[in-house]
Image (tube, rainbow, N blue to C red):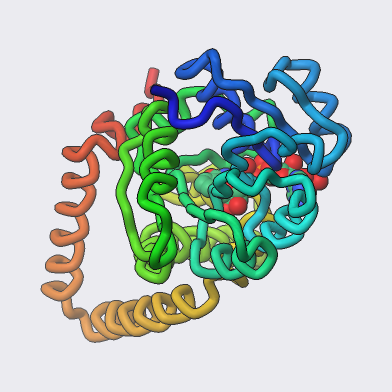
Amino acid sequence: MLPFARVAIIGLGLIGSSLARAIREAMPTVRVTGYDADPDVRAVARAIDLCDDVTDTAGACVTDAELVVLCVPVRAMGAAAAEIAVDLPDEAVISDVGSCKADVLAQLTAVLPDHRIIPAHPVAGTENSGPEAGFARLFRRRWCIVTPPAGADPAAVERVAELWRRVGADVEMMDPQHHDLVLAVTSHLPHLIAYTIVGTASDLEGVTRSEVIKYSAGGFRDFTRIAASDPTMWRDVFLANKDAVLEMLQRFSEDLSALQRAIRWNDGDALFNLFTRTRAIRRSIVEQGQDDPAPDFGRRHD
Ligand code: NAP
């Protein structure tokens, strides 16, 4: 049996449009309605026939929904929930796809205290944004972390988990705070480092911008993919997951200082031991199917 017969998606960017496509592909009888605050995004969504119906107001999108998934930047979640509050059926389940969970859960609970709120985070994405950047296979073999609040209705949790399984994701349950700590080190900190390195390179005086671009295959270009990620989304993630990010940043700064010291004092063993450990982590990621084993990310060398 299908987990939901009618799904409303608020926010039709990369993740919302990918979810709409994935639901229509995996569960063609589910009715998918969509809404986005940006009229241009709504026009594109209609032109590419993204949903069964793209509405001009958030309320109209949710009137008969069994599940509403908020796919907007994390600091816009509360406002998006407020916009649908009056029109939301009492029995509807509310979920979201935000990259941090404790802050989003607090925003949604404040606005919709009487609804079943089951947040989730598909750990899948690209550096692109908007409805045309989405694709149905985005969630295949990627984790979706469902973070129900304490005391959540187990049936609603299972229905949300089943929806994500049907679109190809592997589902894991996690406490929202723990999710934020794990993602701070696996996702948020790497983005912060990429933004820093690319920013540092572009501010250099003794090395020209064209040299940075020309010789980027030395490692720099792999950071530029991450540093090209959506500015609104990432501004919101760092502000909404402030505590966990600052905690991980503190640890990172200490480890960076240790490396600095090892270089200064010619401690080759310290460098070699760390680089050996980190190489093993890359191997585990490939072994667990979380990345392609092709060298140099499968780039062509012909
Ligand atoms: P996106 O491509 O920029 O799409 C977000 C869309 O939501 C935009 O069209 C935006 O319109 C619209 N929007 C903003 N506020 C709204 C509101 N109150 N009501 C209705 N629509 C609103 O962003 P995305 O990459 O899909 O990210 C969406 C969510 O997914 C974020 O919470 C993010 O943390 C999470 N996520 C992202 C990734 C990723 O890799 N991108 C991965 C996993 C989870 P405007 O542009 O006019 O504001």
Residue drawn where x is 72% and y is 32% of the image: 34
Query: 251 or 99, which lies in front?
Result: 99
Depicted 127 relative to depicted 235: above or below: above
Residue drawn where x is 38% and y is 35% of the image: 162
Depicted 209 relative to depicted 263: above or below: above
Q: What is the x, y in percent for residue 151?
A: 39, 64
Question: Residue 288's image quarter?
Answer: top left
Depicted 87 relative to depicted 100: above or below: above
Q: What is the x, y in percent for residue 50?
A: 68, 21
Q: What is the x, y in percent for residue 301?
A: 38, 23
For residue 258, say whether it is visible: yes
Image quarter in which the N terminus is found: top left
Query: 262 or 36, which lies in front?
Result: 36
Question: Residue 104's image quarter?
Answer: bottom right
Q: In screen coordinates, is 37 left or right of 281?
A: right
How many marks overall? 0
Image quarter in which the C terminus is found: top left
Q: In screen coordinates, is 301 left or right of 37?
A: left
Query: 193 or 122, which lies in front?
Result: 122
Residue drawn where x is 65% and y is 37% of the image: 9
Depicted 231 relative to depicted 253: above or below: above
Q: In screen coordinates, is 260 left or right of 193?
A: left
Residue drawn where x is 38% and y is 63% of the image: 179
For residue 228, say whether it is visible: no
Q: What is the x, y in percent for residue 210?
A: 65, 47
